[in-house]
Image (cartoon, rainbow, N blue to C red):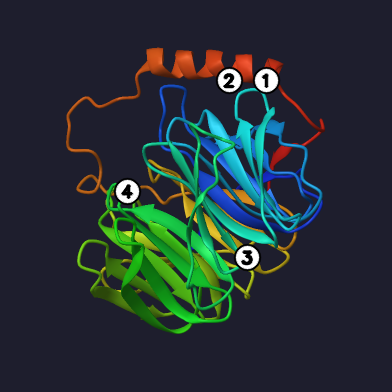
Amino acid sequence: MEKKKVAVPLVCHGHSRPVVDLFYSPITPDGFFLISASKDSTPMLRNGETGDWIGTFEGHKGAVWSSCLDTNALRAASASADFSAKLWNALTGDELHSFEHKHIVRACAFSEDTHHLLTGGMEKILRIFDLNRLDAAPREVDNSPGSIRTVAWLQRDQTILSSCTDTNGVRLWDLRSGKIVQILETKSPVTSAEVSCDGRYITTADGSTVKFWDSNHFGLVKSYDMPCNVESASLEPKNGNKFIAGGEDMWVHVFDFHTGEELGCNKGHHGPVHCVRFAPGGESYASGSEDGTIRIWQTSPVTPEESDPVPGNAPNPKVKAVADEVYRKLQSLQVGKEGNTVERG
């Protein structure tokens, strides 16, 4: 009998409490980056390819439920149980501004043009802050039926989506009118909502179901039942041919997007998986867990038909040299706790 290959992830230590959110930056001239949110109140920035720790953002006084990077990975944002969302310099770790709220903030997202920050939480109000006028009052979009769990921008920042902790479905708001234009119906509250890199799909996880929606017309494209309750799902960004899901069984499952067939199952976490996300190039994906670790898994080798059709598309050593040099500079600017190691797990 052929021995099954076991995936060996990079294991990223450093958080002392559960990891509840992960976010990859797009690919920038300096490479790509991974930011993690944890109940230990300190978001962490890592090299997205290697998992190496770059810095820790210190300043929150409560659990951080969400964190994200802007399109250029120059600024970070975080949403916290200390009733604030913070804006950070992602190169130095300095706090640029704290946006005060009246209750726990659960979610935050930069607009694609990087000029605005969207937040939502227990107040049931979506707020849009102008990052060019940090002291200006935010635009408020209310009438959310419940405490907000997830937020995202789509359609070139013309539309925002949100889901609630205790209410089913995803609501889509047209920012020109401030009104709900569509509700994506689900049977359970949506715990994860991701807009694909190319803007074509919205991937949602609710209960034991993962759904894919057309992000232009909002029709349901695919719906698959999962082997357990899943908290998070992510679509492979390059070919769109597979997706991952993680949840209460502590495993990271890989599925075929077109058929729903399970292609693989990665074991290693010692607690429920709260968040999964594909890296922007699709070559790897990360999972965050109740056990306080982040694990970075390599995507299975693709067949020649799936790989890039451009001949001679080998990695550019100059680009890698620049990325390495920037990483060395970032290392010299590290903030926060030392000793957040990465190991083969």
How many C-alpha atoms fall within 10 Å of the one at disc 4: few (<14), some, or many (≥20)?
few
Question: Which numbered disc, 2 or 3, marks the residue that appears first in the sequence?
Answer: 3
Question: Which numbered disc, 2 or 4, marks the residue that appears first in the sequence?
Answer: 4
x, y (%) of residue 219?
Answer: 23, 74
* Element type at mark 2: helix
**C-alpha span from label 1 to label 4:** 33 Å
Looking at the rendered image, the disc whose residue lies closer to the viewer, 2 or 4, is 2
Residue reaching furthest to the front: 137
Residue 186 lies, with reference to residue 330, above or below; the image says below
Q: Residue at x 59, y 42 (%)?
A: 77
Regarding residue 234, the answer to whether it shows in the image is: no
**C-alpha span from label 3 to label 1:** 29 Å
Question: Which numbered disc, 3 or 4, marks the residue that appears first in the sequence?
Answer: 3
x, y (%) of residue 139?
Answer: 47, 52
**C-alpha span from label 2 to label 3:** 29 Å
Name the residue carrying label 2: 327
Q: Which residue is drawn at 39% across and 46% down?
A: 282
296 left or right, relative to 190: right
Q: Residue at x 71, y 36 (%)?
A: 57
Residue 170 lies, with reference to residue 155, above or below; the image says below
Regarding residue 67, the answer to whether it shows in the image is: yes
Name the residue carrying label 1: 331
x, y (%) of residue 62?
Answer: 79, 54
145 left or right, relative to 256: right
Q: In which quarter of the image is residue 218?
A: bottom left
Name the residue carrying label 4: 302
Using the image, tell me which numbered label, if any, was put on residue 279: none
Residue 189 lies, with reference to residue 94, above or below; the image says below
**C-alpha span from label 3 to label 4:** 25 Å
Q: Which amino acid does label 4 sit on?
A: Val
Name the residue carrying label 3: 273
